[in-house]
Amino acid sequence: MSFEVIIVGSGPAGVSAALELRDRNILILDVGFRAPKLPYELKQNLYDLKKNTADLSPVLLGEKFESLDNLVSPFISPKLKGPFLKLVTRDWRQLSPINSSDFEGLLSFAEGGLSNAWGSGVYRYNDRELKDFPIKAIDLNPFYDRLTSEIGISGCDDELTPFFGSTQGLLPPIELDRLSSDLFTRYSRKKRLISQEGIYIGKPRVALLTEALGERQPYDYHGLEFFKPNDPAIYNASYTLRKLEKQPNITYRSGFLVQRYEETSEGVKVSARNINTNITEEFFARKLVLAAGTISTSKIVLSSHNDYSTRLPLLDNAIAFIPLVAPRFIGASQEKRFFSGVQLNVVYSKDEVDAPIQGSFYGPAGILRSDLLMDFPLSLKGNLTAVKYVTPALGVLQLFYPDAANANNYLKLSSNGDLEIRYQRKAFGAIEKHFISTFRQLSFFSLPALCKYPAPGNSYHYAGSLPMKTQPQTRYEASVNGLLFGTKHVYVVDAANFPLLPSKNHTFTIMANSMRIAHHLRRELES
């Protein structure tokens, strides 16, 4: 059977392209792991559940104590290790191994991709952040607007609007937890002084419903994001996929790992391994849209050229974590109503020459206390006590650093078909010291020695391997409309085509840019 378009991947890039092409004959190919069903419904906050449920260990800890991994294993984000969120990273090392000594990244082959466990921050890029792109914000704005209605985004007009852009279609902002509300109040009183330091604080724009949207109900503030998959109040790309699947012209096939493509006189032949039978099957279409995620898309392209020598650039948002303590809250009662994700956004923008640094402020109330157990310099018993009393006073500021192509940071295909990634760790410290000094004026305290810097790859924000250019010149560059150089029918729509990676969370721009490219492709199919 032949299709007009084959889309590889069901993550944010893939479903956005499919949404724009929804009136065409489309096949979506995907591995598509789905979350297992919870043993019981979670309709209360964690504290009430502990009182009313006999045994929460299957949901909180897992049969193999997966949620305690960070006690003995390298760091992994708490939102990826809950037993019922393991689908996000399920079998990725077997399906697409990565060999690296300095890059701790991961891949997702879940239906909906990393949007099953993302931070849900959605931010528009502006022209300053798009300075190395062959497009401008005006080219993305119509698609940002349409996606705002599709996703359901909470936010407001405040100090960060100049950085975040239009407020059109936003739902009311999320309710702040106690600690974040205190920080925001203190900032509001001193915003003129703090802004002189180049620091601005405001409400986040989050893919979380504060009002009903269609059949999806508002968020309940139970704070179970690290344990409960597929909360309809928090957007997941699979929600859009489910709607698209209902159309007779759109086919979704899970269980297929796309390995390579070959252009023919009629279009494109795609080879994919059926992971259940281990048999390679072929699919045909007039056009191919690669939306498998930066690293997987790059592997497909390199494999299709049997290229085991080219080093493709790889971009990653380096991360810094700054713990901040408000002593007045030490020993306070734990909150029972909260969102465990971003509470406030922080932007550092002082020098017009340099790109802004964006951060997210959040509390640790939604994670297990064991995730903080080794972060205090006391005995095990002392640490348990410290975690209990200090947690209500503890916030974390997570900073993302922008990235540009560097010859030391690359991915390539090894002769055995595995990926090899090298990424040089960046130097940190100056910005963190500035934040610590400034936040002291708001009575939130920290020390540079307490900051943490995860290894490269832990942002899960990857980009730049097949960059868009105004005039692409190699087969590993794409045109402004996503067409891979030297091909007639192969389009790259995920962040692989970003020539630069700003500090902002990039999912919203991936989706808008994917729709923009699909809009161009639709016109081509109609001609």
Image (spheres, rainbow, N blue to C red):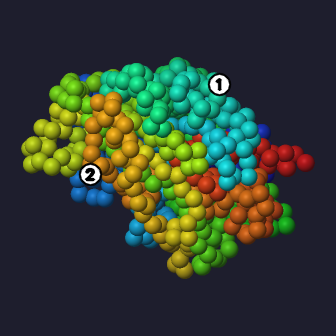
Question: Which of the 4 image quarters holds residue 444?
Answer: top left
Identified by mark 1, the residue type is Gln
> Can the viewer see residue 177 in this picture?
no
Question: Which of the 4 image quarters holds residue 470?
Answer: bottom right
Q: Which of the two labelled residues, at mark 2 and mark 1, occupies the earlier sequence position? A: 1
Q: Residue at x 23, y 53 (%)?
A: 71
18 left or right of 88?
A: right
Res. 139 mark:
none
Image vertical order of residue 400 relative to residue 101, above or below: above
> Which residue is at the front of the view, 406 or 311?
406
Image vertical order of residue 42 relative to residue 21, above or below: above
520 left or right of 506?
A: right
> How many residues crowd mark 2 within 10 Å: few (<14), some (14–19), many (20+)?
few
Identified by mark 2, the residue type is Ala
In the rendering, at what x and y percent does residue 236 appear? Answer: 53, 38
Q: Residue at x 33, y 32 (%)?
A: 441
> Can the viewer see residue 157 in this picture?
yes
Question: Which of the 4 image quarters holds residue 407?
Answer: bottom right
> Which residue is at the front of the view, 366 or 127?
127
Image vertical order of residue 28 relative to residue 230, above or below: below
Give SS at disc 2.
helix
In the rendering, at what x and y percent does residue 385 appear? Answer: 12, 38
Query: In the rendered image, which residue does mark 2 sit on?
Result: 449
Q: CA distance from mark 2 to mark 1?
A: 42 Å
Query: In the rendered image, which residue does mark 1 sit on?
Result: 168
In the rendering, at what x and y percent does residue 327 appear? Answer: 22, 30
From the image, which quarter does the N terminus lie in?
bottom right
Give SS at disc 1.
loop
Q: Residue at x 10, y 43 (%)?
A: 382
Q: Residue at x 56, y 73 (%)?
A: 413
Image vertical order of residue 338 relative to residue 322, above or below: above
In the rendering, at what x and y percent does residue 110 appear? Answer: 50, 50
